[in-house]
Amino acid sequence: DMLMGLLKPSSGQISVDNIPLVGRARLEWQKNIAHVPQDLYLLDASFAENIAFCVPSNEIDLERVKKAAKSAHIHDFIVNSQDGYQGLVGERGIQLSGGQRQRVGIARALYKDSSVLVFDEATSALDTDTETAVMSSIEKINRDITIIMIAHRTSTLKHCDHIYRLEHGKIVGNIETASFQ
């Protein structure tokens, strides 16, 4: 929550590119960051509305929704389900598996078109093959994206350029990715 700029640290400050996340800088940061939590909140609404979260229904760009869903490897499931992108996911996504909910969340983050994605155990419910496919799709997007991945499963980290180990909220070390793989 602090990284997202939602909470202020009790001491010290969070800076991005040496700019403290306060005031207008915090608001600009929030526009450029997307968060995919392990337990994603889904509306009792359509797939399209959940992917284009907080965008009025009449302003949703369905082609952009589909592109995000394809990158998150949830498109085929959606088009083969009843009512496709207009199909309802049910309250809190009750009609979906954990992996399907997480892929909708990843599609939501990609739809937002942010320069920074925070994946907080965002692939924990995906099998290894699906996780690899999703991460490969994200890497192929034709723009620079910084992904901050929080994970317990070490296989999730194999695509990372830098790996840091945290204990009790502090960085206690880093791992060279070449030796990690």
Image: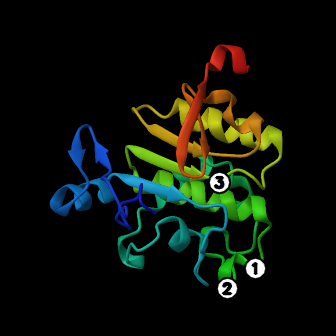
Mark 2 residue type: Glu
Mark 3 residue type: Ala
Mark 1 residue type: Ile
Mark 2, secondary structure of its residue: helix
Name the image quarter holding residue 58.
bottom left
Question: Dot 1 surroundings within 10 Å: few (below 14), some, or many (20 or more)?
Answer: few
Taking depth in this image into account, of 146 and 62 the one nearest to the observer is 146
Taking depth in this image into account, of 110 and 63 the one nearest to the observer is 110
Label whose residue precedes the other's in the sequence (3 or 1):
1
Question: Dot 2 surroundings within 10 Å: few (below 14), some, or many (20 or more)?
Answer: few
Quadrant location of the C terminus in the rendered image: top right
Q: Is residue 80 at least partly visible in the picture? A: no
Q: Are marks 1 and 2 in contact (CB under 8 Å)?
A: yes
Identify which residue is drawn at 62% across, 68% down.
Answer: 40
Left/right of residue 31 with respect to residue 86 in the rendered view: left
Left/right of residue 49 with respect to residue 158 in the rendered view: left
- Reading the image, the residue beneath label 3 is 122
- Residue 180 at x, y = what percent? 71, 21
- Reading the image, the residue beneath label 1 is 94
Tell me how far mark 3 sits from mark 2, CA to CA: 20 Å
